[in-house]
Image (cartoon, rainbow, N blue to C red):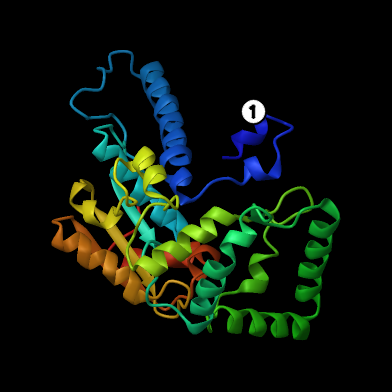
Amino acid sequence: LVSREHVDKNISSRQYWRYSINEHGIEDIPAIIEKIHEVKTSELKSSQPDLEEETDGDQPYKICAVCHSLGGAAILMYVITQRIEEKPHRLSKLVLLSPGGFHGDSTFAFTVVEYLFLLLAPILAPLVPGFYIPTRFFRMLLNKLARDFHNYPAVGQLVQTLMSYVVGGDSSNWVGVIGLPHYNMNDMPGISFRVALHLVQMKRAGKFIMFDYGSAAANMDMYGSPEPLDVGEYYGLIDVPVDLVAGRKDRVIRPSMVRKHYKLMRDSGVDVSYNEFEYAHLDFLCNVSLAASEAHTKGAIWT
């Protein structure tokens, strides 16, 4: 989706932020995978001139997708939609760390946000295309605050405690995250209004659904049915091994919600495994090496 800005340097905020998790799964990931395929096949043909063309879905390389949270939901959408359209997804394995999709079992704070969001959505939609830090000055200010949180541990601990309460007690290193390199003056992560609304729709429906466009006609144009596609109903189409990993301390996506993925996949005949570690939601990202080591010693779920 960042390519939107490369294509049109004068793109408006409203146009830029007009996407849901759907676009991550059916536009972003396919583009990434196809570029990997293009590069890998080119490299292999250069080093192995006698390499035969891909036949019957076989490819001379393997891709294991390791995805966290919203990325887990997006990669599942990608695999399912590619299989429905009878296109190759080119993946050999999925490792999903606290994947999104099911959000029914959540904290009181998230439930309050759900009701407020649904109540205010008609007002916010035309006014707030996305939630982000809009200018270099304010991004610089947040960056300076992040450094201060590290330089003054007492202040950092206070912010950490407040953030943990806001997200229902999740003990992730929230202060450490905003000190990562991709939080800088020039650019900073944000979330589109439609992505937030999509998560609320999933929580309200109690299902792993694609984005509901708000009318039967709009959904018919997109999905061929008046209701958004229920991704979980199509788990039987997943034809690669899936390793699901949950964090026992995770209060953003609780282990019960990851187990819901597991039960649906297992009942649909998917080659799926499930593991839990003593991690909060962001610990999977902040402790990647440790997570990989633990996973290796407890069943080799990382590749």
Residue at x 38% of width, y 61% of height: 101
Front-most of residues 273 and 292: 273
Across the whole image, how many numbered discs are drawn on residues?
A: 1
Quadrant hosting residue 85 = top left
Q: Quick one: quadrant of the N terminus? A: top right
Q: Position of residue 141 (x, y in %)?
A: 84, 63
Q: Position of residue 229 (x, y in %)?
A: 31, 50
Front-most of residues 76 and 226: 226
Classed neighbour count for the residue bearing mark 1: other residues with Cα under 10 Å, few (<14), some (14–19), many (≥20): few
Would you say residue 293 is visible in this rendering? no
Left or right: residue 10 compared with residue 214:
right
What's under tag 1, amino acid-wise? Val
Above or below, comparing residue 46 to residue 228 in the picture: above
Above or below, comparing residue 183 to residue 89 in the picture: below
Left or right: residue 84 compared with residue 187:
left
Q: Residue furthest top?
A: 49
Query: On the image, numbered disc 1 is attached to which residue?
Result: 7
Would you say residue 124 is visible in this rendering? yes
Quadrant hosting residue 140 = bottom right
Q: Position of residue 161 (x, y in %)?
A: 65, 85
Q: Residue furthest right?
A: 137
Residue at x 28% of width, y 18% of height: 51
Front-most of residues 31 and 176: 31
**SS for callout 1:** helix
Front-most of residues 222 and 79: 222
Left or right: residue 181 compared with residue 104:
right
